[in-house]
Amino acid sequence: MTDPLQPLVDLPGVRAAADRARDALAAVHRHKTNRRGWPTTAAEAAVRAARSSAAIDGGSTGLPSVDGRVDDPILAGALRVGQALDGDALRNLTGVWQRAPLQALARLHLLAAADLTEEAALGRPRADAGVAGRLDLLAQIALTSTAPAPVIAAVVHGELLALRPFGTADGVVARAAARLVTVSSGLDPHALGVPEVFWLRRGQAYPDAAAGFGSGEPEAVGGWVIFCCGGLEDGAREATSIADAAATQ
């Protein structure tokens, strides 16, 4: 059976962009600081990713108060997701993703939207026609596609943004799911990259590229995949800066 993502891989510039992302992330994992000190740099990456992801959706970029309180509900949810994408919690969630992606998405939504919606809606996709079927298809693709990992991550990311399966915190969930793809595939096994910073800094270009993916037009879909690969590549540079700073401490 033909891989449904193969036409994406064959679009102009996609494979080269995926290769650059892969090489950049491999290099940061070889950084001298990350040979043994990666738990520290990964923890910092998780916090930066969470704050940037919250800001993309209009949340605060502040840090918790001295007593650990976070007043902004978007940031609070993103930080909870960040904790689930770090250390032992990441290994557990990655295992769930590899067995049952929809369960992992439900868990991410529960964390991200706990302060944004009623309890009964947490982890439950919208009942709108087509949502369940598209999520099932996305889960199958995530588990079975042999496309390069950056391409799979971009598709998971873009489809969740386009579908908005939960109706709240979908952006935070989409970006976290993309991180799970990069970890579970071995592309970024320690979750050192911080592509969220890249997407935040691109301003309107990020939602515009996502809308292009949602349009289904081949050129726009390819543009989104290349854009996401650029985020992974730039996220590796952010990870390098984290590792460089840790080396001087």
Image: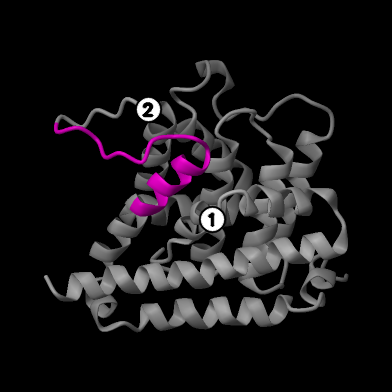
Q: Quadrant of residue 34?
A: bottom left
- Residue 46 in the image, given as x and y percentages of width and height: 36, 54
Q: CA distance from mark 1 to mark 2?
A: 21 Å
Mark 1 belongs to which amino acid? Trp
- Comparing 175 with 2, the one in front is 175
* Circle number at residue 199: 1
The answer to whether one can see residue 147 in this image is yes
Is residue 113 toward the left or the right of residue 85 in the image?
right
Q: Looking at the image, do the residues carrying marks 1 and 2 touch, with CB atoms under 8 Å apart?
A: no
Q: Which residues are magenta?
A: 48-66
Q: Amino acid at mark 2?
A: Asp
Q: Is residue 173 above or below residue 200?
A: above
Q: Secondary structure at mark 1?
A: helix
Q: Position of residue 205 (x, y in %)?
A: 64, 54
Question: Residue 115: x and y, percent?
Answer: 43, 22
> In terms of depth relative to the viewer, which is nearer, 106 or 210?
210
Q: Quadrant of the C terminus?
A: bottom left
Residue 15 is situated, as x and y percent measured from the top left of the image, at: 71, 80
Left or right: 218, with 41 as reference point: right
Q: Against 135, is 238 above or below? A: below
Q: Quadrant of the N terminus?
A: bottom right
Quadrant of residue 5 within the rendered picture: bottom right
- Whether residue 186 is visible to the viewer of this picture, yes or no, is no
Residue depicted at x 62% and y 63%: 228
66 or 187, which lies in front? 66
Q: Is residue 73 magenta?
A: no
Q: Please tell me how crowded label 1 is: few (under 14), some (14-19), or many (20+) other residues with Cα within 10 Å.
A: many
Provide the residue designation for mark 2.
72
